[in-house]
Amino acid sequence: MTSRIISGQPVLIIGAGRGGSALLEMFMEDNLANVVALVDTNPDAPGFALARKYDIPTFTDSVSALRACKEHSDCIIYNLSNDESVAEEAYKVFGDHRVTGGAEVKLFWQMVTNLQAIKGELEKSQDELQAIIHNVMDGIITIDELGVIQGFNPAAERIFGYFTQEIAGQNVKLLMPEPDRSAHDGYLHRYVHNQEKRVLGVRGREVLAVRKNGETFPMELSASEMFLGGQRYFIGIVRDITERKETEERIAHLAHFDYLTNLPNRASFLGILDHSVSLAKRNKHKLAVLFIDLDGFKQINDTLGHEAGDLLLKGVSARFNQSIRDSDTLARLGGDEFIMLLENINNAERAGLLAEKVVDSLAEPFDLNGQAAKVGASVGIALFPDDSLDARELVRQADEAMYIAKHGGKNIWKFYRDK
């Protein structure tokens, strides 16, 4: 049994079939009337079950029902049965012609049926819309023109870490970092009063947002405006793009750095060298380029395997990095070839000392997963401006000097000028 609020116009429904049941359901759902009784000669009529649910009296003969309802002097009677004598009986009880029946009630029943169908379709559409909103991967946030959050779907809950109950009624600027947080009220005010747009209508604008735990993250925002019931609202479709930005950063990093040693690659080194040569020309500084090729790497790679070879290259790069200043640059060109740029050296001897330090750094064997391995290095040196004023030419010259060192006995270093 379901409790009901008794209010509205008193109504007596005669006929508990499809029409009477639909009419009763409409009255009960919308509290449009106070149904005082339901009548049908069939005790198993479908409307009786609904009447019992709402604790509405039921009768199997209309005369008893009419007499029981006499206390409601303004009662409206809907006759959905085929019994035309109901009007006469009602006249005897109430003394007036208050029964709606025949063609009138048929038209009314059809109207009720159509309204119920329309209502069902609207409820279905609303349920489907709510299902979409609750299951989409993107967050959907609705705010009013003051910035107060009115809607916050489950995806937005997952993105920001707030439950709807705790974020609803808060200002949306709570989800923004500074300086946007402090400026947001001004943005809204200028749009509402001057139509000055900032993010409205822009699809996929990248912004920063703040989670409940204070973490700042990159977000994609598409904002639009709507009017509902004479009120202005703004809809924000938001997407957490943290993973995408991290992937973009990794791809950008790989374009400039060696994947194994995390050293600058050839393209990155050449860019650095071009810039350094330009500065050195302007400031009349000396530079040195050291081209390094490992001695004995191929044998280790072939006998112990590529995993051991990779470990060796990482170990070599670590030792080389310890040999140079923070202002200098170490890069891996590929395979077992490395290259160094020494910035602002005083003389050629400084480059020679560094080359010797590089060779000496490989004196101790490397531990490759329990296997001891040892490599050497052949180093070629080219000097700016002594050997060349061109960055690419300096690299070629250092490479040539390295080959002279390798053919001269390995594990030694040579200047290009001494070839």
Image (cartoon, helix red, strand yellow):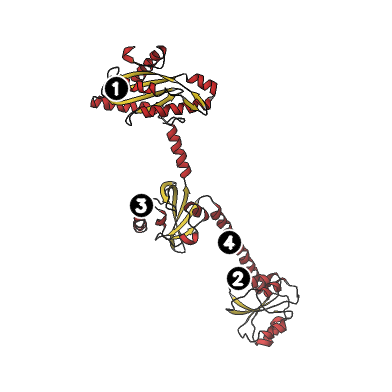
First in sequence: mark 3 vs mark 2 = 2
First in sequence: mark 4 vs mark 3 = 4
Q: Secondary structure at mark 4?
A: helix
First in sequence: mark 4 vs mark 2 = 2
- Asked whether residue 346 is in view, the answer is yes
Residue beneath disc 3: 178
Residue beneath disc 2: 29
Of marks 1 and 2, the one in the foreground: 1
Asked if the residues shown at circle 4 and circle 1 are in contact, with their CB atoms under 8 angstroms apart, the answer is no
Asked if the residues shown at circle 1 and circle 3 are in contact, with their CB atoms under 8 angstroms apart, the answer is no
Q: Amino acid at mark 4?
A: Leu
Of marks 4 and 3, the one in the foreground: 3
Q: In the image, is 6 to the left or to the right of 41?
A: left
Q: Amino acid at mark 2?
A: Glu
Q: Amino acid at mark 1?
A: Arg
Q: Secondary structure at mark 1?
A: helix
Around disc 4, counting alpha carbons within 10 Å, would you say few (fewer than 14), some (14 to 19), or many (20 or more)? few
First in sequence: mark 1 vs mark 2 = 2
Residue beneath disc 1: 350
- Residue 242 lies, with reference to residue 95, above or below; the image says above
Q: Amino acid at mark 3?
A: Glu
How far is the residue under mark 1 from the one under mark 3? 49 Å
Q: What's the mark number on residue 122? A: 4
How far is the residue under mark 4 from the one under mark 1? 84 Å
**In terms of image quadrants, where is residue 266?**
top left
Quadrant (top left/top right/bottom left/bottom right) for the N terminus: bottom right
Q: Secondary structure at mark 3?
A: loop
